Amino acid sequence: MLLFTRNNTNKLHVGITVSKKIGNSVVRNRVKRRLRESFRPMIPIVKSGYNIILIAREPVVHEEFENIKNSVRELLRKANLLKKED
């Protein structure tokens, strides 16, 4: 799940949240690392001036990393947060 709002700066702020319902601290931290790493390469193509929150849901625990990357990209595309490609 992805939530976003405009901010009054020209910076991109990103937060990742994982509920205790997902699992113990080891599982939650692994999910956060995987989400962070799936988002990191997309930073140059994401529009600046937004606060973005990625909220992990239970299926991400068992998902392959490539699918997580594709899902994050698709969420950003649906939210119209990707810069226009030339």
Image (cartoon, helix red, strand yellow):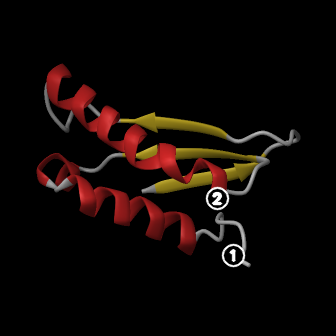
Residue 79's x, y, as percent? Answer: 60, 68
Q: Quadrant of residue 1?
A: bottom left
Of the residues shown, which amino acid type is indicated by label 1?
Answer: Glu
Disc 1: which residue: 85
Q: Is residue 65 left or right of residue 1?
A: left
> In what quadrant of the picture does the C terminus appear?
bottom right
Q: Is residue 50 left or right of residue 54?
A: right
| Labels 2 & 1 near each other (Cβ < 8 A) | yes
Disc 2: which residue: 45
Identify the element where label 2 is drawn.
Answer: helix
Q: Quadrant of residue 80?
A: bottom right
Q: Residue at x 69, y 75 (%)?
A: 85
| Structural distance between the alpha carbons of marks 2 and 1 | 9 Å
- The mark found on residue 1 in the picture is none
Q: Nearer the viewer, residue 3 or 27?
A: 27
Q: Is residue 1 above or below residue 75?
A: above
Residue 65's x, y, as percent? Answer: 23, 52
Q: Residue furthest bottom?
A: 86
Of the residues shown, which amino acid type is indicated by label 2?
Answer: Ile
Q: Nearer the viewer, residue 44 or 24?
A: 44
Q: How packed is label 1: few (under 14 Cα within 10 Å), some, or many (20 or more)?
A: few
Q: Earlier in the sequence, mark 2 or mark 1?
A: 2
